[in-house]
Amino acid sequence: DTEVTQTPKHLVMGMTNKKSLKCEQHMGHRAMYWYKQKAKKPPELMFVYSYEKLSINESVPSRFSPECPNSSLLNLHLHALQPEDSALYLCASRQGMNTEAFFGQGTRLTVV
Amino acid sequence: AQTVTQSQPEMSVQEAETVTLSCTYDTSESDYYLFWYKQPPSRQMILVIRQEAYKQQNATENRFSVNFQKAAKSFSLKISDSQLGDAAMYFCAYRSARAGNMLTFGGGTRLMVKP
């Protein structure tokens, strides 16, 4: 299994809603990441989890709340988002320092 | 801080022809990794090829090869015998070999393949 699975694939939410994005991998990777990608732009790092602990938060607003319940699962909880938060949210995982990152297919989020 | 620059927002190539995508980067480090990722309309970022900075030999993966010029800080991707399925956004990326560092992406190049 060499996949990073993200659900849902698409999500439309209102500015007062609470929703969650899910990312799962069964490759035994100990580092997991959330990226945000706007249209025609490169991915921007949001959070890094290493051994289930948050190691990097790239000054992301608190309306985005990551959670790593176990080594295979990474969530991104969303609350009170703004229309400008509409983007593709990508999850990635990596085994170790000298290995490449595997990416999921992303969740296309639209905030209305 | 490291920066990665892709100077070609869009490129096009005829099917079966060869195309080269450019990438330059800026770093003060000596030990790092460079990558080319492909992002088709399916949205998934797929690793095409990777290069370790300490290796002088250019990496190759089937129809994909790189021209790594460490002194010039240049890392171009050559796609030979282009296929329709190669059409995608291509991102050049840098990662330090130091612990904890993540990928720094270039702005991307949109590759179109003409039949």
Image (cartoon, coloured by chain):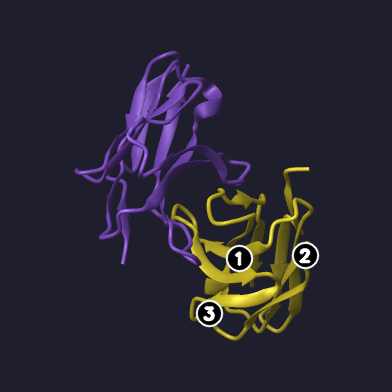
Q: Which residue is mark 2?
A: A73
Secondary-structure class at tag 3:
loop
Q: Mark 1 to mark 2: distance in Å?
A: 12 Å
Q: Tell me, yes or no, whether dots 3 and 2 are on the same chain.
A: yes
Foreground mark, 3 or 2?
Answer: 2
Are dots 1 and 3 on a single chain?
yes
Instruction: Give the chain of mark 1.
Output: A
The residue depicted at 36 percent of the width and 53 percent of the height is: B31
Callout 1 touching callout 2 (CB < 8 Å): no
Specify few, some or many for label 2: CA neighbours under 10 Å numbering under 14, 14-19, or 20 or more. Answer: some
Asked if badge 1 and badge 2 are on a common chain, one would say: yes
Position above or below: B109 against A98: above
Q: Which chain is purple?
A: B
Q: Secondary structure at mark 2?
A: strand
Q: CA distance from mark 3 to mark 2?
A: 20 Å
Query: How packed is label 3: few (under 14 Cα within 10 Å), some, or many (20 or more)?
Result: few
Residue B105: image quadrant is bottom left
Compare residues A90 and A14 and report the one nearer the observer: A90
Q: What residue sits right under mark 3 in the picture? A: A60
Q: Amino acid at mark 3?
A: Val
- Residue at x-position 60% and y-position 65%: A34
Q: Is residue B73 visible?
A: yes
Give the colour of chain A: yellow
